[in-house]
Amino acid sequence: MKKNLKDSLISFNNKNEAYKVRNREVYCLIGKKVKTLFSNNWLEKKLEMRATTRNWTTVNKMLELF
């Protein structure tokens, strides 16, 4: 991922949302009951590339498969 895109995404960190980029993965922690602009479409526009997103429940269900 280009550095300027990574920095752009991280610039959206605030008291309710935290973004972390590692290699090709983007981690986003959003507080409960918080209105956010975050969506898969929003992320694709910010990163200028295709993306998929998973919520924590889905990640845990995927881990159970292994």
Image (cartoon, grey):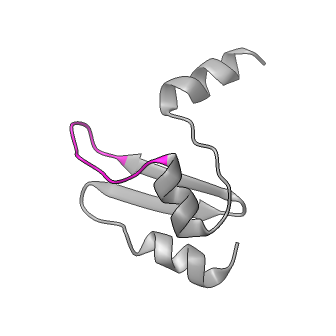
Q: Quadrant of the N terminus?
A: bottom right
Expressed as whole percent of the image width and height from the top left, the position of residue 44 reads 57, 59
Above or below for 57 versus 6: above
Asked if residue 34 lies in the magenta stretch, the reply is yes
Expressed as whole percent of the image width and height from the top left, the position of residue 14 reads 28, 65
| Viewer-closest of 66 and 39 | 39
Q: Is residue 18 left or right of residue 26?
A: left
Q: Look at the magenta stretch and give its main secondary structure.
A: loop
Q: Which residues are magenta?
A: 30-39
Q: Is residue 22 left or right of residue 8?
A: right
Q: Is residue 52 left or right of residue 30?
A: right
- Residue at x-position 68% and y-position 79%: 2
- In the picture as drawn, the residue positioned furthest to the top comes out as 65
- Residue at x-position 78% and y-position 19%: 66
Above or below for 61 versus 56: above
State which quadrant residue 24 falls in.
bottom right
